[in-house]
Amino acid sequence: MTHPPLSRSIAGRCAIVTGAASGIGRASALLFAAEGARVAVVDRDGEAAAAVAAQCGGEARAYALDVADAKAIAATVARIGADFGGIDILVNNAGVSSFCALDDPVYEEVWARALAVMLTAHQRMVRAALPFLRQSDAARIVNIASTEGLGATPGDTPYVAAKTGVIGLTRGLAVDLGPEGITVNCICPGPIRTAMTDAVSEEHKVIFAKRRTALRRYGEPEEVAHITLSLVLPAASYITGVAIPVDGGLMARNA
């Protein structure tokens, strides 16, 4: 198998980004569009997705999709592939906050939703996109996990389990799809300013960041998006199966 030219451009390539109406997904969609990609902005909130697609400009299109719905995934990905004439890049970013105590009456419901949205949906998106990705000369898959997949915060077991599973899924997919030249990697964001962390007061953000991260600050969604971009470049042809923390040094710091 020969690899494509080691280009650092995604201009003209079709990229799907799930959970793209806000946070890391929105930042990724906007960055990809700025780099010339044709972006499928996918989110459960169709109106918000449309607003982001309008900001992207160019050939960006919005698609309303609840990634917990298997039939809807199959239909939406097929539609995207037809609309854009192919799929080159898939970023599985959709997620939900899942803090829940073990003895909470709704724990089972929270657990099921967490795994459905943040783990099962990832493999379904990959499988639905695979016929199109196989036609690309530089197919790239990036799964967004979390540093919660590398460690754990008390009271967060559904989220921790889902994100740990994403890291394992990434490795498995990388091994399965490697012979076809399809790379599969995962990013583990740490404390990032997104809708999920809006509930944390600014005071507590500062305290946590100074206590836990080497850079002593929260990160911005755009800082994660740029690492995602690096992984989906045609030139990123010999990196696969890895989990990259984008965490300001949280996992590196002991004290």
Image: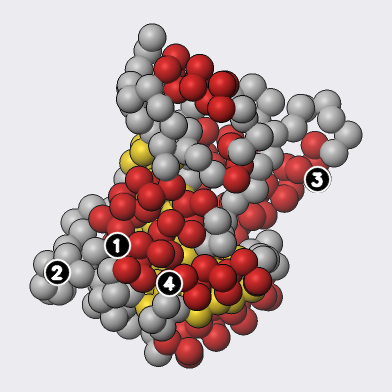
**Label at residue 7:** 2
Closer to viewer: mark 4 or mark 3: 4
Foreground tag (2 vs 4): 4
Name the element at disc 2: loop
Percent across and percent down for residue 35 are 28, 69
Residue 245, position as x, y percentages in the image:
36, 37
* Sequence order check, earlier mark of 4 and 3: 4
Type of amino acid under label 3: Glu
Q: CA distance from mark 1 to mark 4?
A: 18 Å
Specify which label sits upstream in the sequence, 2 or 1: 2
User: What number is the disc on residue 117?
Assistant: none
Disc 1 element: helix
Quadrant (top left, top right, bottom left, bottom right) of the N terminus: bottom left
Amino acid marked by disc 4 = Cys
Pointer 1: what residue? 232
Which residue, given by chain and number where applicable, does mark 3 sit on? 109
Foreground: 127 or 79? Answer: 79
The amino acid beneath tag 1 is Val
Residues at marks 4 and 3, CA–CA distance in whole angstroms:
35 Å
Question: Counting other residues with Cα less than 10 Å from the Cα at mark 1, is it few (<14), some (14-19), or many (20 or more)?
Answer: many
In the rendered view, tell whether residue 128 sits above or below residue 162.
Answer: below
User: Which residue is located at x 49 percent, y 57 percent?
Assistant: 25
* Disc 4 secondary structure class: helix
For mark 3, give the secondary structure: helix
The residues tagged by marks 2 and 3 sit, at their Cα atoms, a distance apart of: 45 Å
Q: Which mark is residue 56?
A: 4
Query: Is tag 2's residue or tag 3's residue first in the polypeptide sequence?
Result: 2
Q: CA distance from mark 2 to mark 4?
A: 22 Å
